[in-house]
Structures are given as structure tokens and as C-alpha cells.
Image (cartoon, coloured by chain):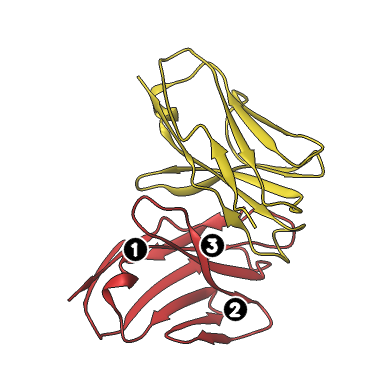
Chain colours: A yellow, B red
Amino acid sequence: KAGVTQTPRYLIKTRGQQVTLSCSPISGHRSVSWYQQTPGQGLQFLFEYFSETQRNKGNFPGRFSGRQFSNSRSEMNVSTLELGDSALYLCASSLRDPYYNEQFFGPGTRLTVL
Amino acid sequence: GENVEQHPSTLSVQEGDSAVIKCTYSDSASNYFPWYKQELGKRPQLIIDIRSNVGEKKDQRIAVTLNKTAKHFSLHITETQPEDSAVYFCAARSGNTPLVFGKGTRLSVIA
């Protein structure tokens, strides 16, 4: 069974631009969560989606948004990029509820904002 | 909301020795505590988890203990090997709330 995939793997953008990241969960998984990973800060929760509905949202500004499609694929968008948005963005999928089922992480998208 | 503190931030041990990483959490309602291992340049992977109705769980050289009264849980790795070198993250969650991660411990096993 294929694992969680994320595209693109690397991105370089300049301040003020916007970016869209994509996550394809493991086949059959319906829950997708997004995290921002930066050195020294660990993993910080962005959003959690289940069956196209956002169930939880982290403490990030409104420039960060996401959505989930009917095939469970998910995208996140960051508008008006800032230098501090440079990070590794990880998504994780689980069968249904991350509480009851293991979360499997994708390889991440490394975003660099210049 | 939940806050998870993880210590130490870096840990070096000799091969064959044991390693212990400790985490404390603030929300007494938290009831799920996973540990993830992230090797350099790779994705985090779940290595063990424990739920609040259990005090200890073992899987070969890895064990996790949970003290709900004190609100702390620990990861124990025995007979460490060079391939155990990685960053380890603890996390906690309550019900359907998101996982809250600690800031990570960089473990180096010296051969």
C-alpha cells in the first residue's frame, strides 16, 4: 500500500507570494492533519480534516487555509508569505479518527521564503 | 489548551546504555500519548503509544510509562544502538482535540 505523498517536495517563494501544498493520504484513510515543523519548535498543528470537514484548527493566522476533497486528498494554502513561514510542512493521514488510529506522516514539503 | 514540555533537548549515550526522555503535560483530560521518531531527513514515525488506562507499555527495547497523577510520561530505550540516533517527539491529546507535540529530543548514540 502506498504511503502518504506530498507535492511538491521543495518550494522556494518570495515574500508576498502565495503557495499551495498538496497531500494524498494512504488509500482508504479519511482523516488528514497538517503540521508546521521548524527547528526548535517541533511540530505545530495547523488543521485536521475528516470527510471534507475541518474538525480542528490550530493557532495560525488566517493566511493559512486548507481544504479536503471527496477523495480525501487535501491541500493547504498560505497567502502573503512571510519569511517566518519557511518550514517543513507535514501532513499525516489516519484511517478515521487520529485518536483511535495511528497517524502516518508524509515526507513533507520544505518551503523556503526569500 | 494543552502544553507539552519535553526534556532533555539533547541526549548523548554510549552504545548499549539506556536512554530516558521525559515529557510533562498540562491538560488532565489528555488520554493518548504517542512517541514519534524522526531520523535525519525523514518523516516522523510512530514507535509506541500509550492510553490513559495503562501505566506502562513495552515493545522490545522500547517502553513508555505514564503517571497520570503527576501528568508526566517517559520513553525508555534500553541497549541503545547507533540506529536509535534520531529526534524523538512526545505528544498528547484529549479526545478529539489535536495532538500537541513536545519540542523534541535529539538522541545521539555513540559507538
The residue type indicated by label 3 comes to: Ala
Q: Earlier in the sequence, mark 1 or mark 3?
A: 1
Out of A3 and A34, give the one closest to the viewer. A3
Q: Earlier in the sequence, mark 2 or mark 3?
A: 2
x then y, percent, for residue B99: 61, 56
The residue carrying mark 2 is: B68
- Pointer 1 local density, CA inside 10 Å: few below 14, some 14–19, many at least 20: many
Label 1, secondary structure: give it: strand
Query: Does A73 sit above or below residue A97?
Result: above
The residue type indicated by label 1 comes to: Ala
The residue type indicated by label 2 comes to: Lys
| Eye-nearest disc, 1 or 2 | 1
Numbered badge on residue A105: none
The residue carrying mark 1 is: B86
Residue lying furthest left in this view? B111
x then y, percent, for residue A25: 66, 47
Point out the image quarter for the C terminus of chain B.
bottom left
Query: Does A68 sit above or below residue B72?
Result: above
